[in-house]
Image (tube, rainbow, N blue to C red):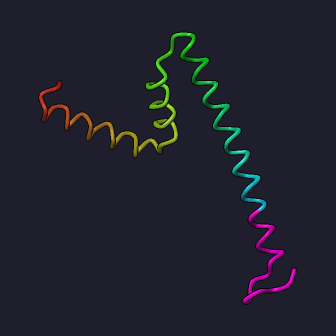
Amino acid sequence: MAEVGGIAGDHLRSFIERIERLEEEKAGIAADIKDVYAEAKGTGFDVKIMRQLVRLRKMEEHDRTEQEEILDLYKRALGME
């Protein structure tokens, strides 16, 4: 494919097709994750809490500690502790 307006069509098409394939893979992975959460829920686990744990485990330890300290501070300010 020739260049149009300074854009190499073949190169652009290659990027677009790669992105489309990755989007398909992402959708498949998202469906797999949903299935795992459903399985966990079926065995009695609290999926909401599991999602929080996954989010916390992704965080750096110092960020997680800081967030927990701020949460505790806010809870004390509201008389929740």
Above or below for 61 versus 44: below
Above or below for 67 versus 5: above
For this orientation, the residue located farthest to the top is 43
For this orientation, the residue located farthest to the right is 1
Q: Position of residue 33 (x, y in %)?
A: 63, 31
Q: Position of residue 57 (x, y in %)?
A: 50, 36
Using the image as rendered, state which of residue 48 and residue 56 is in the foreground. 48
Residue 12 belongs to the span the image colors magenta: yes
- State the image quarter where residue 74 is shown: top left
Above or below for 46 versus 57: above
Q: Position of residue 49 (x, y in %)?
A: 44, 25
For this orientation, the residue located farthest to the bottom is 5
Q: Which residue is rendered at x = 71% and y = 38% of the image?
A: 28
Using the image as rendered, state which of residue 71 and residue 10 is in the foreground. 10
Task: State the count of labels.
Answer: 0
- State the image quarter where residue 76 is shown: top left
Horizontal side of residue 22 vs 62, given as left or right = right
Horizontal side of residue 43 vs 7, given as left or right = left
Horizontal side of residue 31 vs 49, given as left or right = right
Residue 21 belongs to the span the image colors magenta: no
Q: Position of residue 50 (x, y in %)?
A: 49, 25
- Quarter that holds the N terminus: bottom right
Q: Which residue is rendered at x = 52% and y = 41% of the image?
A: 58
- State the image quarter where residue 80 is shown: top left
Q: Which residue is rendered at x = 73% and y = 52% of the image?
A: 22
Magenta residues (range) = 1-16
